[in-house]
Image: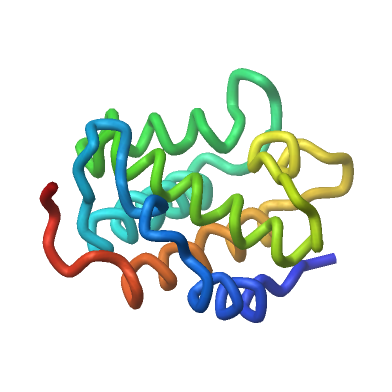
Amino acid sequence: MMADFAFAAQAVSFRIPVATWIGVSGERPSGASISAHLTATADLLKLTGWEPTFERDLSAAMRAARANGVGDEDTQVVGRDLMEQILQVHLKAPFAQIDAWAEKPGRDLADVLDLITQAAELAAAYGPVKAGA
């Protein structure tokens, strides 16, 4: 059963805290770079398939995209935060962690790709135009 995260992503776009866009370096990655990292993660999952295990969780896929030269730790952290905010709205939950959500029994690749795609579109549409402090 595929979840539809479009509504949740739209709701998040109206309430994104400014701190969301700040990476662990203290700088803001551009929305385009966050979107590219998320898109590369989705492309990698389409290529390799989805086997939600500790060694191959969603965070590992995001790290693999970085290892392939797309994004950095900031784009990974901000992209993850966007996905978690979308999940929180979608699930009406005060907290949601992407790896725990993705590993739930019955979760399929289509659900995971939908979440990643909505976060990538959100980053592209509402993220900072230029990277920097």
Q: Quadrant of the N terminus?
A: bottom right
- 122 is higher (above) or lower (below) than 87: below
Left or right: 79, with 57 as reference point: left
Whole-percent x, y for residue 52 in the image: 70, 33
Whole-percent x, y for residue 53 in the image: 70, 25
Question: Quadrant of residue 7 in the image?
Answer: bottom right
Question: Quadrant of residue 68 in the image?
Answer: top left
Of the pair 45 and 58, the residue shown nearer to us:
58
- 74 is higher (above) or lower (below) than 113: above
Whole-percent x, y for residue 71 in the image: 25, 42
In the image, farthest residue toward the top: 55
Left or right: 2, with 76 as reference point: right
Residue depicted at x 22% and y 51%: 29
Residue depicted at x 75% and y 51%: 94
Left or right: 16, with 32 as reference point: right
Left or right: 55, with 108 as reference point: left
Residue depicted at x 76% and y 68%: 3
How many numbered marks appear? 0
Question: Quadrant of residue 102 in the image?
Answer: top right
Residue depicted at x 55% and y 54%: 83
Of the pair 45 and 35, the residue shown nearer to us:
35
In the image, farthest residue toward the front: 18
- 51 is higher (above) or lower (below) than 5: above
Colour scheme in the image? rainbow
